[in-house]
Amino acid sequence: MVSQRTMKRDEKRPKWWYEETDPAGVDYSSAELVQRYDCHGGFLTYEHDAAPVDAIVSIFVLHHLPDFWKLVGLKRAAEMLKPYGRLFLCDIVFPSETANLEAELNAWVTSIAKQSGPELAAEAETHIRDEYSTYNWVMEGLLARAGFEIGSAEYSGRLQATYVCAKSGP
Ligand SMILES: C[S@@+](CC[C@H](N)C(=O)[O-])C[C@H]1O[C@@H](n2cnc3c(N)ncnc32)[C@H](O)[C@@H]1O
């Protein structure tokens, strides 16, 4: 878990823990106390032996875990956060409201092929076939059961979901 961000003061006290290497699209430039905290481990294996952190960022990672393990991983993440600490979670989730899910998935793969070429389109197919993206309502339920309040849930780019959550109070 490595961040490219230049971290600022308070070098000895971890303030932010990046779950992933590239919190793309997240602007923390106004967060003065951001500190780099490199470590290795996954949702199920990382042991946080420091003070609880202010925020956790996870980008396109959680779909690697089946739903049972997603909840285990999210609960572990919640335990590492301060009360009211933030979780920024971005991932591919399936829409449950759509009348024709198959058409929606085909359109997703086609749009990736057009934008990024056949290799990434093949990866998208692999994602649908072999990985563990879940439905939007399941993801929202998992977050709630892990102890998060969802401040915003944004669904865009057909299958992309972005959740900004706060850990429920003590
Ligand atoms: C699709 S890549 C996303 C990488 C990067 N966040 C990005 O947006 O480009 C998926 C990443 O999930 C990581 N990963 C897989 N299983 C994980 C787990 N159980 N806990 C944490 N990370 C995991 C992989 O190592 C890989 O880096």
Image (tube, rainbow, N blue to C red):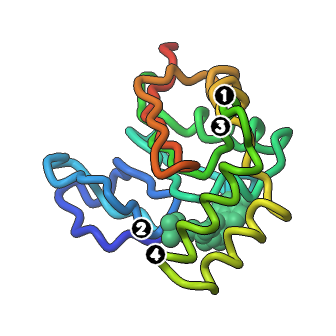
Residue at horizontal 64 percent and vertical 76 percent from the top = 121
Q: Secondary structure at mark 2?
A: loop
| Residue topped by disc 4 | 115
Q: Position of residue 129 (x, y in %)?
A: 84, 63
> What's the CA distance linking mark 2 and mark 1?
31 Å
Looking at the image, residue 140 sits to the left or right of residue 67; the answer is left
Q: Is residue 60 above or below residue 70?
A: below
Disc number placed over residue 22 in the picture, else none: 2
Looking at the image, residue 164 sits to the left or right of residue 70; the answer is left
Kind of residue indicated by mark 4: Gln
Of the two numbered discs 2 and 1 on the same chain, state the one appearing first in sequence: 2
| Residue topped by disc 1 | 97
Kind of residue indicated by mark 3: Pro
Q: Secondary structure at mark 4?
A: helix
Viewer-closest of 132 and 145: 132
Q: Position of residue 131 (x, y in %)?
A: 79, 60
Q: Secondary structure at mark 3?
A: loop
